[in-house]
Image (cartoon, rainbow, N blue to C red):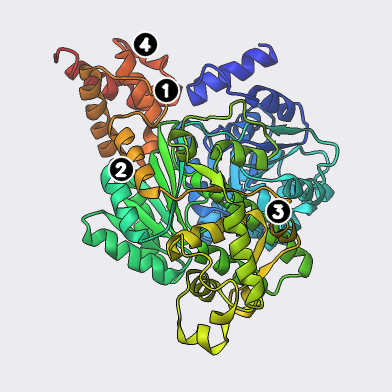
Amino acid sequence: MSETDRLHSTLSSVFGLTAFRGAQDAIIRHVTDGGNCLVLMPTGGGKSLCYQLPALLRDGCGIVVSPLIALMRDQVAGLVEAGVNAAVLNSTLSYQEASEVERRLIAGDLDLLYVAPERLLNPRCLSLLEQARIALFAIDEAHCVSQWGHDFRPEYIGLSVLAERFPDVPRVALTATADALTRQEIVERLSLDHAPQFVSSFDRPNIRYEIVDKKNAVGQLKTFIAERHAGDAGIIYCLSRAKVEDVARALQDAGIAALPYHAGLDAGVRARHQDRFINEDGVVIVATVAFGMGIDKPDVRYVAHLDLPKSIEAYYQETGRAGRDGKPSAAWMAYGLQDIVQQRRMIDDSDASDSFKRVSAQKLDALVGLAETVNCRRARLLSYFGETFASENCGNCDNCLTPPRVRDGKILAQKLLSCVYRTGQRFGAMHVFDVLVGRLTEKVQQFGHDKLSVFGIGRELNEKQWRVVLRQLIAMGHLHADSEAYGALRLTESARGVLRGETEVRLREEAEGARNRTIRAKSRRGELAPASPGQSKTDAVLYTALKAWRTETAKKRGVPAYVVLHDSTIDGIAAARPATLTELRGVAGIGDRKLEHYGTELMEVINAHRAEP
């Protein structure tokens, strides 16, 4: 059998697939031939196949380094279901269980072994690996090795030892999110200097991006869920543990199956909440950013942010947990001026070096720019990762669906900047607004600001409208909120050009209510998301029956439902309605072992609904 035939035979028999996606073919052949590489592929793009298949094709055991216990557990469960000899080696195992895994590794009885980085770097584990035959090393979540990445983990730095102690074993580093700076550090730390980089498109066309002006964030969230995602699984991110608890309670009071998740909860509670989220339909998790990495739940229909993430990488990684199955999903965020001040304060108050703070501030500025852009959000998001979007209108973000009105904002900008300058660049937004609109407060009188030429020059707008203007000027880089001076507004160098009339300023007009109503109406009419394959009435009945069978089977086997069969596989069965086991084997996701385990039962479900109208 030729290498190509062997490759496709394994792809079909183990994974139930007939073709590769994107760069998978090239990556798998390169690694199988013993090459090192860096793989950047979006969540749901098929990264795991890029090391799982080569590990099966090469002699020895593939070692997968991952910081995520949940990912290890679910991927190993899925591989075992597919007939692969896979195991984990992490802190959840007892001494006896770990010893048995180590015995199987030395005996050559494993195809894939998932190891936590701190476990792998233990001298005993490294010695164990030197006694075994290793097919490859896969470093998953490789952005964790970079201090510039959004989820830096110190234990990852030690992975440079792999190139030193196992120079002849291929290394493949994989991540869904890395800008140019992060990629370069991955390459340096993992000694991938001369290795090819396979960079897939970062576009997730099934995800609708929407960012709204934060007014009553929890109320806005409840409306969003009720009107567009009632009964759907979702993840909601908050910055603090207290806010997580408050939001979860508010959603529970609204009849939504919401559960909190943060590091302050008892480990047993966290585990139960995570298991419910993974195994039950329609559960919503409210969490700090610690939740979600490695959660392979494919049917998360929305990810919502009630606080601003720290960078576009973090935003992309977190929103990428929606719609891993390729079905229409949403990334929704409520955002306001206080978010910018809060994130800047966190940067300034950190113990990091000046260079790290500077880069962190630049990353935050890029995210604020995404939030404030009047153009296509998808194009702006992709351009951050060095990718050019083919169209100026993606048709699936709020700015493209309901374009905001834009006006010449030079005069408004000059008034606001002048007010900040005349009041001494020592005050926060509230005081500046008081002066602008001519509000004679005690503080305004105390400092004599009612005598300034700028007092009352902005009466044409109310405070809420000025807040929108201020946020956009900060996003454009003309103003800076100094966190060390309690949010005092200060002019930047570029403000000079605005005040002199040399710099053009285009401002978005705030019409959030109208935009939201339009989006909600389009959502109800099914106009928002890319079309997905339709189902006939009979297909829908069969689909429901197949999901019920999967739920019951997953409970019996003690694994998540998607480990038994992915939604896409159930879609395929419901659409094809196979009449024989051979036809069932032709559905994507049904490999030899799945057919052996579930074929007869699946055919019984199909046949029971074959005669229904």
The residues tagged by marks 3 and 4 sit, at their Cα atoms, a distance apart of 71 Å
Judging by the rendered image, the residue that carries numbered circle 3 is 501
The answer, for residue 238, to whether it is visible in the render is yes
Residue 229 is tagged as 2
The residues tagged by marks 4 and 2 sit, at their Cα atoms, a distance apart of 35 Å
Q: Please name whichever residue, 460 or 480, is drawn nearer the observer in this view of the structure.
A: 460
Judging by the rendered image, the residue that carries numbered circle 4 is 583
Judging by the rendered image, the residue that carries numbered circle 1 is 590
Residue at 58% x, 21% y is 20
The residues tagged by marks 1 and 4 sit, at their Cα atoms, a distance apart of 10 Å
Which of the two labelled residues, at mark 4 and mark 2, occupies the earlier sequence position?
Answer: 2
Q: Position of residue 561 (x, y in %)?
A: 35, 39
Which of the two labelled residues, at mark 3 and mark 1, occupies the earlier sequence position?
Answer: 3
Identified by mark 3, the residue type is: Gly
Q: Please name whichever residue, 583 or 80, is drawn nearer the observer in this view of the structure.
A: 583
Residue at 38% x, 22% y is 595
* Foreground disc of the pair 3, 1: 3
Marks 2 and 1: in contact by CB < 8 Å? no
Q: Position of residue 499 (x, y in %)?
A: 70, 59
Marks 1 and 3: in contact by CB < 8 Å? no
